[in-house]
Amino acid sequence: MRLVFCSLFFIACSTDFTSKTCAVDGDCSDGDVCELRDATAVCVKAVDAPLLIGQSAPISGTNQALGTGMKLGVELAFAEQNAAGGIRGRQLTLDFRDDAYDPPTAEAAARAFTDVVVSASDPPRCPSTMMIPEPDGHGNTTAISNTAMTRGPKAVLAFLGNVGTPTMVRAAPVAIETGTIYFGAFTGADKILRDGTAGDCAKYVFNVRAGYDQEAQATVDLFKKRGVTGYANIISFDQQDTFGDAGYNGLVAAYTTDYAMLGGSQHIARYQYTRNDDTSVASAATSAESYLSNLLSTTSGTQVVGIMMTDTYGAGATFIQALRTWQFDGLQTSLDKGNRLKLYFSNVSFVGPNSLSDRLVTAGSVTTPSGPMPLTQDVYVSQVVPNYQSDTSDVVVAYNRLIGAAGQQPSFTSLEGYIDAKVFIAGLLSHQGPFTPDGILAAFENLPQLSLGLGATAGFSSANHTYSRSVWGTSIMANGSFKNLYFWTTNSAIQFFE
């Protein structure tokens, strides 16, 4: 690569200077790094080689707290690393777009992030590109593309911390079809990210959190501990889309593992609400109440019921309040609902635990024969990160220090964003050559143990692109705090802290 320099002392320009070629950063002088320029690896000033990372998440609309938290966590980690010198001088830059938890908006953001170039005739290289994984939320069900898509010159290096399942199934296929890393998405769904339907393009997907299958297994183990005896005493409350499907399918699979095969007319009762529409919860709650009434009328004695909730905070708080109000409304006295029903509500991690807690505490309590019952009673969350209120691992201590210094309130969601970004940054730091999506794959797959406090089995490999398979169960207390309830990890028995 030749650079042209002109001087006021010469009439003509010199073309004798040639940039130094390189293979790794160590081949360059201090302050320079090795990067591609016109497809050639040459030494350039680190300040001229920022690493652009894309994130799409909701910071407006019904579920804005989810995107706000993830964005904050990523920004904390980026600011921390940039202050420490970046990636050998390269600064981390976040290109953020608000998708309002809307699938078409998330897909449009993904196309913008990848500066996508759509082929006129070449077939896609990824099976997921032509899948029809999810209606777009506006009545349309279409494939992402019927032809190949490639990265344009302004594409981001990677996606980091995108939020949601219905948005992911429209955005992730764009990312991986163009050969762009899709890292640390805030979803535990199997579809595309973990189920193999992306084919060879799955190499561009790296999950940090445990999946909804793992959360469902931990939840069923919890229900069994609480005295739930069979499928008739389990209910699913979930969002009517791929997010809800992921939770419900995980629940059915976990029930099969802990109890017995479901067969014939046997099925776990399911009640759903519409994404981004908390007013749709009322109908689901009424149906669940009818189911519980029938359960009481056809059985005797106390009925212990576990309700797994694949939901977001507004819908979850509304559903819990509706069922508790019904349980103690003094009607249907022959059923003795207040005494014969024991309800346990377990929300998946995506719910937005802090926002759920805030809403339940604000809603207060219900009046029972024995006095007020806080709406937080027997409400749990299957977390995929440690409890920031009590955990003392290095990553949690660092997060609490940074969030305090930023003057922000801590949350499980922003902690997840911070942890995702810390794992991502560790991969970048271990890579020495020019930064391209394909170039950094091996750096992630060969990360050493980072000792982040996410369990002894945490890590990536060439055969495993899910970093953690651990779940930390918490109870929401009457004052809104979170109490450690259990720890669960793959291939180990659930451990209760009670």
Image (cartoon, rainbow, N blue to C red):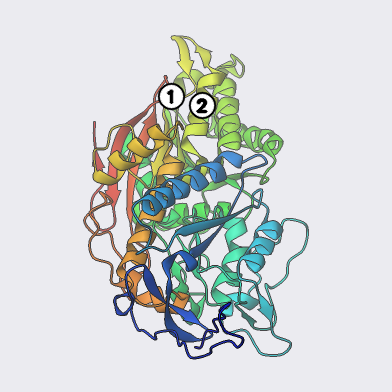
Can see residue 242? no
Label 2 crowd bin: few (<14), some (14–19), many (20+), radius 10 Å: some
Up-down: is 280 above or below 120?
Answer: above
Up-down: is 460 above or below 478?
Answer: below
In this orientation, which residue lies closer to the viewer: 11 or 171?
A: 11
* Residue appearing at x 61%, y 41% in the figure: 63
In this orientation, which residue lies closer to the viewer: 365 or 397?
A: 397
Q: Which mark is residue 480?
A: 1
In this orientation, which residue lies closer to the viewer: 230 or 279?
A: 279
Q: Which mark is residue 70?
A: none
Q: Position of residue 135 (x, y in %)?
A: 70, 62
* Residue appearing at x 55%, y 67% in the figure: 156
Q: Which residue is mark 2?
A: 358
Which element type, helix, strand or loop, lies under badge 1? Answer: loop
Do the residues bearing badges 2 and 1 touch, measured as CB atoms within 8 Å?
yes
Left or right relative to 154: residue 22: left
Q: Amino acid at mark 2?
A: Asp
* Residue appearing at x 63%, y 45% in the figure: 272
Which of marks 1 and 2 precedes in the sequence?
A: 2
Residue closest to the far front: 9
Left or right relative to 75: residue 460: left
Left or right relative to 151: residue 344: left
Q: Position of residue 163 (x, y in %)?
A: 55, 52
Cα separation, mark 2 vs mark 1, equals: 6 Å
Which element type, helix, strand or loop, lies under badge 2? Answer: helix
Q: Position of residue 238 (x, y in %)?
A: 57, 46
In this orientation, which residue lies closer to the viewer: 146 or 31?
A: 31
Q: Residue 495 occupies which quadrant of the picture?
A: top left
Can see residue 371? yes
Left or right relative to 148: residue 353: left
Q: Position of residue 12 (x, y in %)?
A: 60, 88
Q: Amino acid at mark 1?
A: Gly
